[in-house]
Image (cartoon, rainbow, N blue to C red):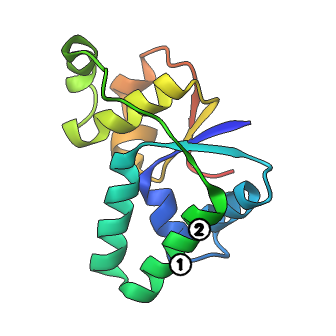
Amino acid sequence: MKVFLDANIFFAGARSPRGGSGFILELAKKKKLEIVTVNHALLEAEQNILKKLGLPYLNRHYQNVLEIKPKIQSIKFVTLGEIAKFKKVIPKKDIPILLGAILSKSQFLVTLDRKHFLGNEKLKRIKLPFKILNHW
């Protein structure tokens, strides 16, 4: 099963390995899930972990990524038209996440972002090729 992860799942998994996000990462380590993300998400997770949690948690994050070996979905050939389509739906910083999930053909996008993804009424009106979840 192909699952696209937002940065906040990597952050929460590094902070609390026994929580819901940690559980998703453990399933991925056991090859029960195929994890996909974008460089944007990994960089955001890295910056937030270092800033908010510190170096020991950043090391845990790196270990998680090494064990999971997520597929990195390229979004460099996305057109301006594709980007513009979502500018009125989600904040600019979240467009790479949405486009990465679409291009990866993932079955699920897992995020903890209630405001911009889970509770976003405009986004709910778009027929997306995946379900958006906040837990597994």
Left or right of 44 in this view: 84? left
- Checking the image for residue 64, the label placed there is 2
- Checking the image for residue 120, the label placed there is none
Q: Nearer the viewer, residue 111 or 81?
A: 81
- Decide: is 104 above or below 136: above
The quarter in which the N terminus is drawn is top right
- Residue 97: tell me if it is visible: yes
Left or right of 130 in this view: 102? left
Counting other residues with Cα less than 10 Å from the Cα at mark 2, is it few (<14), some (14-19), or many (20 or more)?
Answer: many
Horizontal and vertical percent for residue 126? 42, 16
Horizontal and vertical percent for residue 66? 59, 64
Left or right of 94 in this view: 132? right
Q: Residue at x 69, y 50 (%)?
A: 136
- Checking the image for residue 60, the label placed there is 1
Task: Check contact, mark 1 vs mark 2: CB within 8 A.
Answer: yes
Amino acid at dot 1: Arg
Horizontal and vertical percent for residue 114? 41, 48
Left or right of 88 in this view: 136? right
- Decide: is 104 above or below 118: above
- Residue 119: tell me if it is visible: no
* Count of picture labels: 2
Q: Residue at x 40, y 39 (%)?
A: 117
Amino acid at dot 2: Asn
Q: Residue at x 38, y 50 (%)?
A: 41
Secondary structure under the numbered disc 1 in the rendered image: helix
* Residue 52 lies in quadrant: bottom left
